[in-house]
Image (cartoon, coloured by chain):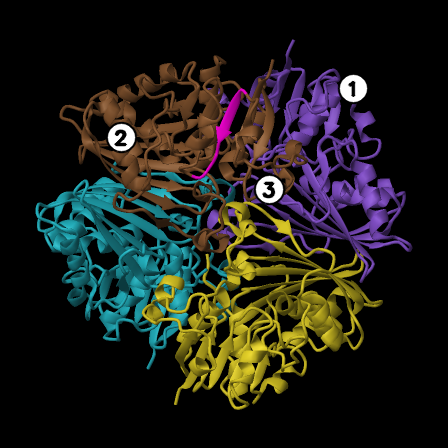
Chain colours: A brown, B purple, C yellow, D cyan
Amino acid sequence: MAVRAAVAGASGYAGGEVLRLLLAHPEVEIGALTGNSNAGQRLGALQPHLLPLADRTLTATTAEALAGHDVVFLALPHGQSAAVAEQLGPDVLVIDMGADFRLRDPADWERFYGSPHAGTWPYGLPELPGARAALEGSRRIAVPGCYPTAVSLALYPAYAAGIAEPEAVIVAASGTSGAGKTPKPHLLGSEVMGSMTPYGVGGGHRHTPEIVQNLSAVAGERIAVSFTPTLAPMPRGILATCNVAARNGVTAESVRTAYEKAYADEPFVRLLPEGQWPATASVHGSNAVQVQVAYDDAVGRIIAISAIDNLTKGTAGGAVQSMNLALGLAETTGLTTIGVAP
Amino acid sequence: MAVRAAVAGASGYAGGEVLRLLLAHPEVEIGALTGNSNAGQRLGALQPHLLPLADRTLTATTAEALAGHDVVFLALPHGQSAAVAEQLGPDVLVIDMGADFRLRDPADWERFYGSPHAGTWPYGLPELPGARAALEGSRRIAVPGCYPTAVSLALYPAYAAGIAEPEAVIVAASGTSGAGKTPKPHLLGSEVMGSMTPYGVGGGHRHTPEIVQNLSAVAGERIAVSFTPTLAPMPRGILATCNVAARNGVTAESVRTAYEKAYADEPFVRLLPEGQWPATASVHGSNAVQVQVAYDDAVGRIIAISAIDNLTKGTAGGAVQSMNLALGLAETTGLTTIGVAP
Amino acid sequence: MAVRAAVAGASGYAGGEVLRLLLAHPEVEIGALTGNSNAGQRLGALQPHLLPLADRTLTATTAEALAGHDVVFLALPHGQSAAVAEQLGPDVLVIDMGADFRLRDPADWERFYGSPHAGTWPYGLPELPGARAALEGSRRIAVPGCYPTAVSLALYPAYAAGIAEPEAVIVAASGTSGAGKTPKPHLLGSEVMGSMTPYGVGGGHRHTPEIVQNLSAVAGERIAVSFTPTLAPMPRGILATCNVAARNGVTAESVRTAYEKAYADEPFVRLLPEGQWPATASVHGSNAVQVQVAYDDAVGRIIAISAIDNLTKGTAGGAVQSMNLALGLAETTGLTTIGVAP
Amino acid sequence: MAVRAAVAGASGYAGGEVLRLLLAHPEVEIGALTGNSNAGQRLGALQPHLLPLADRTLTATTAEALAGHDVVFLALPHGQSAAVAEQLGPDVLVIDMGADFRLRDPADWERFYGSPHAGTWPYGLPELPGARAALEGSRRIAVPGCYPTAVSLALYPAYAAGIAEPEAVIVAASGTSGAGKTPKPHLLGSEVMGSMTPYGVGGGHRHTPEIVQNLSAVAGERIAVSFTPTLAPMPRGILATCNVAARNGVTAESVRTAYEKAYADEPFVRLLPEGQWPATASVHGSNAVQVQVAYDDAVGRIIAISAIDNLTKGTAGGAVQSMNLALGLAETTGLTTIGVAP
């Protein structure tokens, strides 16, 4: 008996990506597709790559439209998920791909989003210590941000192993789909092609407190994070370069051991062989995370680098992976570690 | 019982793409992977996006290595397939993704390739009239060139319906993977990004006689083809713009009817709704073909445009589709019409 | 004594490009910079590549702001130039980079733009027969569209020499800046990178009547034009592939002679050596036009291909070249044939 | 009387860029153009964007070919400059765009290049303290590496002002032209488009000791540098994100003051208004450096970011700027701060 899934916000990039994955998921049947400004339009006009759904029409995002599904994916502007979730009842699996339920500290939320905090849901990054258990059987899931996914998976093994000082410097490059589908001048193709530019510098990016939350929980102490995101001329992908001082006594071997141990059994995270570095093209469209780590003994620092597809593992793939856990399906069902390259 | 498949030339783009698709094919088990200059290397170093095969090692392309498989895909430099195929025996399904067995007229082959003609195998473009039947049960398949796939599917309905004059002007833009993985100065990223440039202008491209062959067979008369390929700054995709004079009495309606009829039942070809145009991004990584056609009554010409992924439907996807037919599997097994976009 | 120039519409791509060129022009002093929705903003925020003008502020586009200049460049939405020009007086050189004054036939204008025709000004493509003389001393100039510039320079020598039949098939690829700076979903970087797509197919593009006008004037008979523009994943550049049937008796030599003759003395048009093909990267930021032509005797057709920078020779460079002629300066003043590559 | 300049290594990216700039330089006449593997070829075939030089032919790089010039630019593989320079005599201005004469410490050279150290020449980054004076009248100049140019200009003001701790974490993204024109598989357009990937991680990049040298000289103590370069999908540009701990007592104001003071009078470096961030597109083809700095008081760190064109200010523009100083010309002659955007 198929799991019946609805997607609220089906016209945007996160919504489109979750539909792409659900179409390939053997246990899922796609139900309602909703949108607000695009209600009434054919999906074929909005997501022309989803040919099997081309003739479906978006309806407005209402409780009625979303009723009667086993799973509802929310791909809504931040601040809107709580109201929708409340109407869905406790037995429906609600998976929020927005930011609303990621942060534990209401003060963090209010500082970065300027509105009341909606709450905290189990966090959909199964690879973090303790996260998988919290997702199993859950009926509410907060999908992590794309940068926090990439950064947490690059750095948590160092903190779990106690080999890193509690201050992390992170520079990440993201493809433009991370900025969404709402047209803005700086996101025009003419502007982004051939250009790299930073944004949210100096602690201003909303994913900063989420990164701090994840790493601090693993480390057992507060990790200071200096995070600089940059916009790269590509549609998809995040490359996160994370740099931390090593604790005394750390060696190249102890660094590698920490990462090997963390990822020995993870189906989606691949610690690359020494000398090979992650590339976003290699995880294009896949749920895989490529990780590599180096110890620079000249300066006593650990450099951990990850590559993900921001829309797949960074958003919709993480959502489906968490859905699988919540529903008791095999965690990898419907997901791939094979990228579309070149 | 799984179909056991080998890939000769597994380090290149065609070989990598056929492996990507076979990994997702429910009836196939991947056997030998061979290469020549790369024999002995880990596939993970050569095709880092194929994580499940990362620890496999390439062997040399020998009869011994390729023996014992049900299907052998050949992704070899042109002129090398015949010798390998001969060694494989008549019961093995040999699928040549190179050019060697596509052309029927030895003179065409000799003029464009400068070597003796190896022969002609059933042509792996099932959508062409009569092609599907020839592929069913066959043990030898010649996979079409990427441009001929895109162009033939854009134009054949016009010739099948007798609405077009026998002279076609075609301009196609291809992503750079069509030019292969051998490093050449003009294929460097620094050269291709931000640039459009033609090549093989004036009838010189080796895909020209294959296009002529396909269209002429459908039309029942020789079609003169003026084909100009261009290199576009993208890794994948072909957009073929085909322009033919309409025969007397043709109308916008008769044009549309011809295309609707041709593609009503084709699982991989989608005639788009009027007003929507093909985009290569929409078929990225998919086996779908997006087609649209317009009749310009001011000049009495038909403009038919198709978009494919040159590596998927244009090469490896067409190969797998044909393999399915040859083996008696459902034609769409292991293939998708869902693109990876944006 | 410097020529004092104002730019109306300084926040868009055409306005930015004319400023880039005027900054390098030894005879010009930049005066008023106007915009409407962006009035009051620093140019540094709108055109961050124009560092010498970063601290200039846009004013509203009014007659007062534009008064007191020797030259006024108009980079306005179509339909707005006539009203502004009227207020500027007959002694001011007004150079319209919009479409308003390009077409000679009011019916053409009305069919493609749906508003009353404003008139016809001398046409700023000096390379066309007779055009240079009409520009010398003129005080009104209509800058050609970017596609008509590329196409007319690729094809006019064939019509001037009487070697081509009166029907042209044209497929052109344009960088995204040709679509302007107003944010629209299909122009987002996420949408355009990695994608080729056509638009305005079947005679619908507004540049079609302008191409017909140019070629017909040269040929002395009406030329039927089937023009298909495509959007390419690059910020700048047009590659125009033009295909015409050769008249009886035409040979490769007579084709080449026609082009050599046409461009022997043109400072900005370069007929490339045989075997070398135009590339948009080679003319990036330059006013040069690269042209190549081939005769395909298998089908009796001439393929003429040009590459330009749509913003430079295709818009602002053509405007400055025409300004030079109108003001009696050397035609090449302030312009370059050197591209920024790779 | 014109300065007569020769370029050794005219077929590569550095050589092509210096020619592009010299063509626009009012005091320079271009003399010999040499190359080794490309000797005998037309420059038009190798550098098709340099139309005015298209008909020049490369000669072999010999002392005879380079004799009789006032300035010789060397764009040679590392290790070859010393032998050529020796033959040119002490009165010829020799400008090495390679690495051979940048490092002061022979041990640094030997460790990173594995060959004997050739020596140290005046360093062509005039903006660094003391550098300008050393360049004036010099007849030997070592042009900085592209990354050291971007990083040193982003960070030196912090060290000059004594506001930063002596440990810098740097992540820089470079366009592919920084990797040169020699074809290699990982530099193919198919590989780089849509992909971000690091290289030389963990202190391995050869520009690391040069960065350490520059910053340490300014700081008066050894600066530990953790430098991670990444390859970005664009032909040109470097975005350098530099992150250092602030010393006690540092405030946002003191940080800004340090940078304002450093760059108040520099013709090519622009400290952007607060809130505006550097973008590589804005300096495409220009000699400008865009710099911005932020103080993140939540973590007590300074983030300084610069954007340059790696081929212009990062290589050939820096070379011409230094040439101007050496020859007593105005420093900005022939150079621009205007980028080619979008």
Give the CA distance from mark 3 to mark 2: 37 Å
Does mark 1 fall on the same chain as mark 2? no
Which circle, 3 or 2, is nearer the viewer? 2
Q: Which residues are magenta?
A: A70-77
On the image, the x and y values in percent for residue B310 come to 63, 39
Q: Is residue A73 magenta?
A: yes
For label 2, the SS is: loop
- D280 relative to A121, above or below: below
**Disc 3 marks which residue?**
A46
* Residue D85 in the image, given as x and y percentages of width and height: 27, 60
Residue type, mark 1 in image: Gly
What secondary structure is found at the residue carrying circle 3? Answer: helix
Q: Is residue A58 left or right of residue A316?
A: right
- Residue A77 located left or right of residue B280: left
**Badge 2, how many Cα within 10 Å: few under 14, some, many 20+?**
some
Look at mark 2 in the image and give the residue it sits on: A105
Dot 1 alpha-carbon crowd within 10 angstroms: few under 14, some 14 to 19, many 20 or more: some
Residue B316 x/y as whole percent: 64, 31
Tell which tag, 3 or 1, sits nearer the viewer. 3
Q: Which residue is mark 1?
A: B137
Upstream in sequence: badge 3 or badge 2:
3
Name the residue rendered at 32%, 36% in the picture.
A116
**Callout 2, which amino acid?**
Asp
